[in-house]
Image: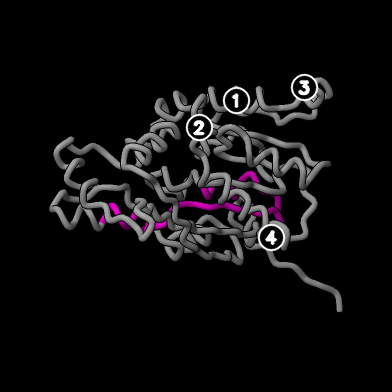
Amino acid sequence: MRRDFADAAGTYDSAAVLAREVGARMGARLDLVKIAPQRVADIGCATGDGIRDLQQRYGKALPLALDYALPMLRAVRSRTPRLQRMARRGPRLLNADVRALPLAANSLGLAWSNLMLHWLDDPLPALKEMHRVLEVGGLLSFATLGPDTLKELRAAAAGVGAGDTVRRFLDMHDLGDMLVAAGFGDPVMDMEMITLTYATPRAFLADQRHLGVRDALLGAKGWRDWRRLLAAWPEDAAGRLPASFEIVYGHAWKPEPRQVADGRTVVKFHPR
């Protein structure tokens, strides 16, 4: 998937309707949280919509844009206003994997990740790493795809005996458990369905290709199976093909540590 995603840097924005909408809804959730982070990071930033929003929200914070695809980071740089670049106020670009962040422990006030975690076979190492780099009291805010994503295609595949298709995603309860296992406190999870519609199957497949996720999302299947499956995709009342995406939102805080590095338990006494 890394190569496909990197190759899609030039076409990503033309198809990133869902990511932009989810990012806006993540931003609305931040409106309810009073924080003043000194450093913010968009982890899995793609072409940078998220980090640009974070810059507007937290103008005094140092912005970090992180992605494992170098062409995406180049796109972030090209979309940074010239005056920002000249004044060195643009995002700092980091080419890295979320499971091995090149950041010091306790260095971030806010870690933001929009529609990235579901591409990991196991998100727990990434959550542990984001916990490591957040400062005590720091916030993790993310959105990811849930198990009812593209339920229409799953149903069509079952109806024509085409076998399993569409990547399987974790539900919000599993993700909540992982947040606790990673060391976060008070995780808050919720979900909603967002449905996009397409005039033809070809338009849907083109969008996924432009995003660089078609093979990772839909897997490898013979053309005959795909032809039968797509022909069974039910139209909505307007004659368009619905594609539902279950969006799971999560946010969680990094609490005070209960143990120090050598394993001793931290006990605090407060004067009366």
* Vertical placement of residue 244 versus 52, above or below: below
Is 141 magenta? The answer is yes
| x 51%, y 26%: residue | 9
- Residue identifier under label 1: 75
| Residue 234 x/y as whole percent | 27, 56
- Residue identifier under label 2: 12
Disc 2 marks a residue whose amino acid type is: Tyr
Which one is earlier in the sequence, the residue at label 1 or at label 2?
Answer: 2
Cβ–Cβ under 8 Å for marks 1 and 2? yes
| x 52%, y 33%: residue | 14
- Residue identifier under label 4: 256
Spatial CA distance of label 2 from label 3 is 22 Å
Cβ–Cβ under 8 Å for marks 3 and 1? no
Depth check, mark 4 against mark 2: the one in front is 2
- Residue identifier under label 3: 82
Could you say which is closer to the camera, residue 255 or residue 12? 12
